[in-house]
Image: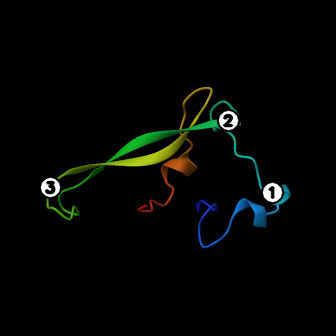
Amino acid sequence: MTMVPGKDGVTLDNIDLTHATTLECEECKCKGFKQTMMLKKLSPLVSPTGQEAMIPVAAFACEKCSHINKEFQEAEIQAQ
C-alpha cells in the first residue's frame, strides 16, 4: 500500500477518486478510520544495535470497533 499525497509531486488534485475503492473495517464494515500506533518488536538478531527494539508504527484503526485491518497491519513501513 502506498500513501499518495505529497509523494513525488502527486496530490489528490491529480487523481480521479471515482475509480478508487472505499475501504471498510473487516470486522464491522464501518468506513471511518482513525490514526493510531502499533508497536513492532525487533529481534536482536536483525536489530542494527544488536539489542531488542520496540518500534512505533503508524496504522489506521476502525472508528467504531478499533479493529486494524490486516491490510494496514502488513503495510510497507516507510521511514519519514
Q: Which quarter of the rendering shows the N terminus?
A: bottom right
- Real-space Cα separation, disc 2 to disc 3, in angstroms: 38 Å
Counting residues from the start of the chain, the first of labels 3 and 1 encountered is: 1
For disc 2, the neighbor class at 10 Å (few under 14, some 14 to 19, many from 20) is some
Which type of secondary structure does the marked residue at label 2 adopt?
A: loop
Counting residues from the start of the chain, the first of labels 2 and 1 encountered is: 1
Q: Give the amino acid at mark 1.
A: Leu
Q: Is residue 63 above or below residue 19?
A: above
Which residue is rendered at x = 60% and y = 63% of the image? 6
Q: Which mark is residue 72?
A: none
For disc 1, the neighbor class at 10 Å (few under 14, some 14 to 19, many from 20) is few
From the viewer's perspective, tell me whether residue 18 is left or right of residue 56.
Answer: right
Q: Which mark is residue 17?
A: 1
In the picture as drawn, the residue positioned furthest to the top comes out as 64
Which type of secondary structure does the marked residue at label 3 adopt?
A: loop
- Real-space Cα separation, disc 3 to disc 1, in angstroms: 44 Å
Q: Which quarter of the rendering shows the C terminus?
A: bottom left
Q: Nearer the viewer, residue 9 or 66?
A: 9
The residue that label 3 is drawn on is 51
Q: Is residue 68 above or below residue 1?
A: above
The residue that label 2 is drawn on is 32
Q: Quadrant of residue 33?
A: top right
From the viewer's perspective, tell me whether residue 39 is left or right of residue 48.
Answer: right
